[in-house]
Image (tube, grey):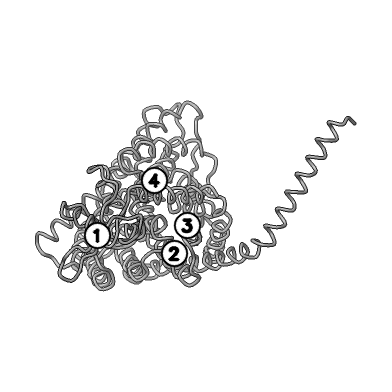
């Protein structure tokens, strides 16, 4: 053996021993805390799982009672036999109860959902509103049970956030830990709701945390598995949808058709999202114009839903029966199109009326109907080179849902786990990629991020857009009297020119002054009882930039840790 070979081997052995010593040091000093954290993640996962399971069972029980049926899975078929007055009054009464709950326990009468959880993850150290969240959870339960046309994932995701917030407050968790615990709770809730452990974990990472940091992966997976186990203890290892006629893809020849389907689904998802926002704006305008009390708005929406349900009972609730009929091809072309249009209208009325619920399940139903309609046309035009039309329903279901959620990875997987059919993944991925690529350019990335953008919470553009809104001028300013700050007379001179910011303002409000007026600093003031502006410090441009840079660095470090 040559001298150089021995040297190389010696260096490799030295590096290996050094790595082992480092690993042992990490295990000794960080191992116990990591194990403790994973245990907390497991407990949160179990709590969120039972919460999601209880929510699902409560909806089924209340629906069975209100609509006098033993099998809520076929609620739509049963509702066709009920008296029209009962179909009309049930959502009206439910809407009035929802309005009373939200009016009493929220400050704005608005239901909290996934968008608020995303905001909590990004801006408030993984915390969400607890009292308003519990009220929204109760309101959504009544909405879905009494005829509201939404889904159950939104309420359980926010309630999972309430659970993790309670734990984070008790253990005084910092921002990173709070966000990780929030991700654990969300993953468990989604997994328990849909028996989808892989998609539940990825949903928490892709949609809520909006990064795939390695440090968050293990605890989130632990919580997701816990939620799935809870679901399977109650319902068994079964999929949400059972495909009786699984499709077969005529490879390569049919792929252009799925590309076109993806683009159509992108437009359909855009129509769904825009319809909801339009209904929200119209509802607010009418409420203000007529001076309607806040608690009455859900009741009015319930009346509109009741009228619609008399002729189209398929809009009631989550809509799994209609989704199954679409996936099995048990609908005519005109029926599929009409049902998709009516469901879109119903979802817009429910959410625009602030009745509560989520958009994922409705987007699955609308996507399946859209895909079936497209498949019936495509297979009818080219029967010799086409597979079954149900395959298009399967792909459409994923394509619309992915575009609405802005989550192509987790939505693709959750569709697979909902159906248990992994053989046609190519068709689904092609449609999902096209729909997401199109819709994300026509809205602010997703339905949830667009909701936040409409509230002036700028998360869609990334940390560089919203971090300035998290930093207060009072925390970055140099106090008056500091040797490095301006004097009180200099501050008053700038205030007389209209140049000042409040101590409670954010850097987002302060930075435009520096760009517009080209000044090195701006006075920071507080408003006294007489309404006068009293200077307490000065915000320097260089200090604001340093604080912003530190926040960006901390965010990047968390996302890549």
> Secondary structure under badge 2?
helix
**Direction from residue 305 to residue 265 in the image, left or right:** right
Q: Which residue is mark 3?
A: 194
Are the residues tagged 3 and 1 within 8 Å (C-beta)? no
Q: Nearer the viewer, mark 4 or mark 1?
A: 1
- Mark 2 vs mark 3: in front: 2
The residue singled out by tag 1 in the image is 488
Give SS at disc 3: helix
Q: CA distance from mark 4 to mark 1?
A: 38 Å
Determine the residue positioned at 33% across, 63% down: 144
| Residue 301 location (% of width, % of height) | 21, 61
In the rendered image, the vertical position of residue 229 relative to residue 417, given as above or below: below
Mark 4 or mark 3, which has the lower sequence index? 3
**Residue that protrudes farthest toward the right in the picture:** 1
Residue linked to disc 2:
160
Return the disc, 1 or 2, that comes first in the chain's sequence.
Answer: 2
- Image coords of residue 450 (percent x, y): 31, 48
| First in residue order: circle 4 vs circle 1 | 4
- Choose the circle earlier in sequence order: 3 or 1: 3
């Amino acid at each position: 053996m040559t001298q150089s070979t021995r040297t190389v081997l010696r260096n490799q052995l030295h590096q290996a021993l050094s790595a082992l010593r480092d690993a042992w040091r990490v295990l000794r000093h960080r191992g116990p805390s990591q194990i403790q954290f994973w245990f907390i993640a497991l407990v949160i996962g179990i709590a969120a799982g039972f919460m999601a399971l209880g929510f699902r069972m409560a909806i089924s029980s209340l629906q069975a009672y209100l609509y006098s049926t033993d099998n809520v899975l076929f609620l739509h078929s049963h509702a066709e036999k009920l008296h029209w007055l009962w179909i009309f009054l049930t959502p009206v009464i439910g809407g009035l109860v929802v309005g009373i709950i939200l009016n009493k326990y929220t400050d704005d009468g608005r239901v909290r959902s996934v968008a608020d959880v995303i905001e909590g993850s990004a801006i408030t150290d993984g915390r969400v509103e607890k009292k308003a969240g519990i009220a929204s959870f109760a309101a959504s339960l009544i909405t879905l049970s009494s005829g509201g046309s939404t889904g159950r994932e939104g309420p359980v995701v926010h309630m999972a956030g309430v659970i993790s917030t309670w734990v984070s407050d008790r253990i005084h968790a910092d921002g990173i830990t709070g966000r990780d615990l929030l991700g654990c709770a969300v993953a468990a809730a989604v997994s328990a709701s849909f028996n989808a452990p892989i998609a539940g974990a990825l949903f928490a990472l892709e949609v809520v945390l909006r990064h795939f940091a390695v440090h968050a992966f293990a605890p989130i997976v632990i919580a997701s598995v816990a939620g799935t186990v809870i679901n399977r203890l109650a319902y068994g290892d079964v999929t949400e949808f059972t495909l009786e006629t699984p499709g077969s893809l005529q490879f390569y020849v049919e792929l252009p058709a799925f590309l076109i389907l993806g683009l159509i689904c992108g437009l359909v998802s855009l129509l769904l999202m825009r319809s909801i926002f339009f209904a929200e704006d119209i509802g607010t305008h009418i409420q203000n114009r007529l001076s309607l009390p806040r608690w009455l708005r859900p009741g009015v929406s319930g009346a509109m839903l009741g009228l619609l349900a008399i002729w189209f009972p398929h809009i009631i609730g989550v809509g799994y029966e209609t989704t199954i009929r679409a996936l099995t091809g048990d609908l005519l072309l005109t029926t599929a199109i009409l049902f998709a249009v009516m469901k879109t209208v119903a979802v817009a009325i429910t959410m625009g009326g602030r009745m509560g619920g989520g958009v994922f399940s409705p987007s699955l139903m609308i996507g399946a109907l859209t895909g079936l309609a497209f498949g019936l046309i495509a297979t009818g035009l080219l029967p010799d080179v086409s597979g079954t039309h149900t395959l298009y329903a399967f792909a459409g279901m994923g394509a619309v849902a992915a575009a609405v959620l802005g989550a192509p990875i987790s939505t693709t997987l959750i569709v697979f786990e909902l159906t248990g059919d992994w053989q046609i993944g190519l068709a689904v991925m092609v449609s999902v990629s096209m729909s997401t690529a199109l819709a994300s350019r026509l809205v602010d990335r997703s339905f949830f991020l667009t909701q936040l953008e409409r509230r002036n919470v700028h998360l869609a553009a990334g940390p560089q857009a919203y971090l300035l809104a998290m930093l207060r001028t009072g925390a970055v300013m140099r106090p008056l009297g500091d040797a490095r700050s301006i004097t009180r007379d200099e501050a008053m001179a700038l205030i007389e020119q209209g140049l000042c910011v409040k101590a409670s303002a954010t850097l987002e409000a302060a930075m435009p002054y520096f760009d517009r007026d080209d000044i090195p600093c701006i006075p920071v003031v507080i408003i006294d009882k007489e309404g006068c502006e009293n200077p307490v410090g000065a915000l320097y441009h260089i200090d604001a930039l340093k604080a912003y840079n530190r926040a960006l660095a901390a965010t990047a470090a968390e996302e890549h840790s």
